[in-house]
Image: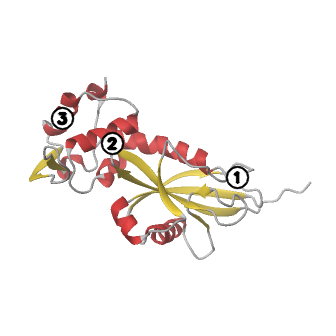
Amino acid sequence: MEKSYYNVLETLLLIYATDGGKLKIYLKKKNDEPYKGYWTLPSAPLDTETTLEENAHIIYSGMTGLDETTMFQSKAFSSLDRDPNARIIGISFIAITDKALTDMKQNADDKAWFEVDELPKMGFDHANIIEEVSKDVKKKIVTNYDDMLLAFFPSDFTLPELQSFYENVLGKSIDRRNFHKKFVNQDLVIDTGFKTSRGSGRPGTLYRFNVDKMKGKRIWMKKVLD
């Protein structure tokens, strides 16, 4: 039998954000077959006039209503049974966004945020893709590889908020004093001089990352995590 070398390429976009200390991903509900009513990653086939990177940015803008984002190319997925109708190779991209801004721009019933470890019923192989890519994202968050941590927290945050994010990403508790020392004593964060005003509890100190110390550098958390 003569082999076929015809393949369709698609761009798959994994849009991540932090919310309440949780790592979340933005998905869309499929409105047609196959997998009608299931949730999927936003995606689009690659035409002959568009690059993978351009395609990823087009998808991002359509999903979020935003133009600016931090984006990385991730992995390729080429299982023979990825799609029941065609031989499709998926190239995944990671986008990191602001959940609050996205919610302001896009309020639709067929789009929603989910925790990466508590996904809804997923179509195609997208649950496996999210699991595989999210493992890499979590590793990069913990060490700030590719400035991943800076991308998730571009503005002010409290240290308990940051610690909660770390603990959810790692799936384990961290000693508060060690965590505080790691970031404060090494000047990885800067006290903004402001405090939170939300809620009835004690106001929390707002920090931001020291970009001069953090950008392009990895954080070693071994002493904090042991």
Label 3 neighbour load within 10 Å: few <14, some 14-19, many 20+: some
Name the residue type under label 1. Arg
For mark 3, give the secondary structure. helix
Residue toward you, 4 or 110 = 110
Residue drawn at (39%, 65%) of the image: 103
Rendered position, 56 above or below 77:
below
Q: Residue 125 placed where, x, y %?
A: 65, 49
Left or right side of 33 for 43:
left
Identify the residue under disc 1.
82
Give the class, few, some or many, for how many residues have Cα within 10 Å of label 2's Cα (few <14, many ≥20): many
Dot placed on the residue nearer the N-terminal end, 3 or 1: 1
Residue behind mark 3: 180
Give the vertical position of 203 relative to 60 (above or below): above
Q: Residue at x 37, y 59 (%)?
A: 99
Q: Label 2, on which residue?
A: 165
Q: Quadrant of residue 29?
A: bottom right
Local secondary structure at mark 1: loop
Which of the 4 image quarters holds residue 90?
Answer: bottom right
Q: Quadrant of residue 49?
A: bottom right
- In depth, the one of 129 and 174 nearer the eye is 174
Identify which residue is drawn at 17% across, 48% down.
200
Cα distance between the residues tagged 3 and 2 = 14 Å
In the depicted view, which residue is nearer to us: 118 or 202?
A: 202
Q: Earlier in the sequence, mark 3 or mark 2?
A: 2
Mark 2, secondary structure of its residue = helix
Query: Residue 54, position in %: x, y?
Result: 50, 70
Q: Nearer the viewer, mark 3 or mark 1?
A: 3
Viewport quadrant of the N terminus:
bottom right
Q: Most extreme residue toward the bottom, as rendered?
A: 49
Residue placed furthest toward the left = 193
